Image (cartoon, rainbow, N blue to C red):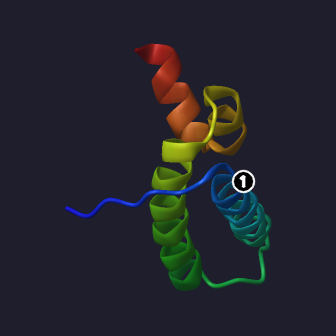
Amino acid sequence: MMGLILNEREVKEMDYLLKRELDEILLDLGDERIDQTVKKAMMERYKYLFSLFKRIASPKDCLRYMLKEDKELGKKI
């Protein structure tokens, strides 16, 4: 296990970069021209980036980027 210490400015930058990347992936996942194999790889990347995002973001921001099936699962629990 590794640790990382970030100052407030670095956290804001990380937050911005992750949001931007998550938005881009969500946009591309909706594109019908992209092959399903590529979308599967994008989904893997999305899940990884979202797990990083959850560590620095507020719960409100996390809800915005949570995938639909994850939101439905949260309602059942």
Q: Is residue 70 left or right of residue 26?
A: left
Q: Which one is in front, 19 or 38?
A: 19
Residue at point 56% right, 51% down?
Answer: 53
From the viewer's side, name the closer residue of 42 and 21: 21
Question: Given the current orientation, which residue lies at the most extreme left position?
Answer: 1
Q: Which residue is mark 1?
A: 12
Q: Is residue 30 above or below residue 39?
A: above
Q: Position of residue 15 (x, y in %)?
A: 68, 54
Q: Residue at x 69, y 28 (%)?
A: 60
Side (left or right) of 4 relative to 32 = left
Residue 16: image location, x then y, percent: 76, 59
Q: Position of residue 20 (x, y in %)?
A: 77, 64
Going 57% across and 78% down the picture, which residue do you hit? 36
Query: Is 66 placed above or below 31 here?
Result: above
Front-most of residues 69 and 46 = 46
| Image: 59 above or below 3 | above
